[in-house]
Amino acid sequence: KQEVTQIPAALSVPEGENLVLNCSFTDSAIYNLQWFRQDPGKGLTSLLLIQSSQREQTSGRLNASLDKSSGRSTLYIAASQPGDSATYLCAAGSGNTGKLIFGQGTTLQVKP
Amino acid sequence: DAGITQSPRHKVTETGTPVTLRCHQTENHRYMYWYRQDPGHGLRLIHYSYGVKDTDKGEVSDGYSVSRSKTEDFLLTLESATSSQTSVYFCAISLGGQGTEAFFGQGTRLTVV
């Protein structure tokens, strides 16, 4: 059974810092890995999708990597801003049905 | 935002009453999903659909049923609501397959008293 873990559960950094959020999964036979952002009381916003055949994806200040052999994905945020404060969730895709197994998220606070 | 509308957005209901949540999409995506989000558990899949009248169970399906009579609508029904079903419910859609993203609705906050 696939299990997804995100550590740390919470992170507080000063504005401008580069930071890395971690996601690990137990079954390397994932279909894809998706990162989401969730603001308090809101839905999930898709940030990046990495297919199993890819090693990384980039969007603006965000870069996500995938290492299936080690069961890890990282989300790199460059030059963090207070507006980046949110909960970040990773989810492993299992098969072509699009079902997702979620980690419990990392809550990020970027202080001005 | 992807064209996903959940209704209602908030609901308070009494234990033992039936409740139906609706998800409506305008994207013509094949797959639709219902997840629940709870502190300490994260998001967990309840049921999903891979086409009209085609549905399957997820990880936490007990106490829930679903129906999909049209491509654009996916209904989640709690036959007899219990306090353990107090949660935030999210609908999601995707085209399916390896390279497609999942898109989520804004959620329905359900409180069972």
Image (cartoon, coloured by chain):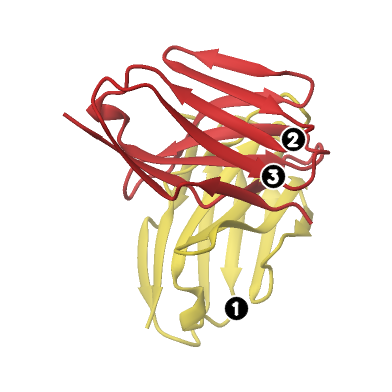
Chain colours: A red, B yellow
Which of label 1 and label 3 is nearer to you? 3
Q: Is residue B71 visible?
A: no
* Numbered marks: total: 3
Q: Is residue B62 left or right of residue B5?
A: right
The three-letter amino acid code for the residue at tag 3 is Phe
* Chain letter of the residue carrying label 2: A
Q: Which residue is mark 2?
A: A70
* Residue B91: % across, % down: 55, 49
Q: Is residue A81 visible?
A: yes
Which residue is outermost to the left? A112
* Nearest the eye: A65 or B96: A65
Q: Given contact means CB atoms under 8 Å apart, are the residues at marks 1 and 3 in contact?
A: no
Mark 1 vs mark 2: tell me if same chain: no
* Residue B102: % across, % down: 61, 35
Q: Which residue is mark 1?
A: B79
Q: Given contact means CB atoms under 8 Å apart, are the residues at marks 1 and 2 in contact?
A: no
Count neighbours of disc 1 (C-alpha within 10 A) and say few if under 14, some if 14 to 19, many if 20 or more.
some
Which of label 3 and label 2 is nearer to you? 2
| Local SS, label 1 | loop
Q: Residue at x 60, y 78 (%)?
A: B79
* Nearest the eye: B3 or B35: B35
Q: Which residue is mark 3?
A: A25
Q: Residue at x 59, y 68 (%)?
A: B77
* Residue B76: % across, % down: 59, 62
Count neighbours of disc 2 (C-alpha within 10 A) and say few if under 14, some if 14 to 19, many if 20 or more.
few
Q: Is residue B72 above or below residue B33?
A: above
The three-letter amino acid code for the residue at tag 1 is Glu
* Chain letter of the residue carrying label 3: A
The three-letter amino acid code for the residue at tag 2 is Ser
Q: Is residue A15 left or right of residue B111?
A: left
| Local SS, label 3 | strand
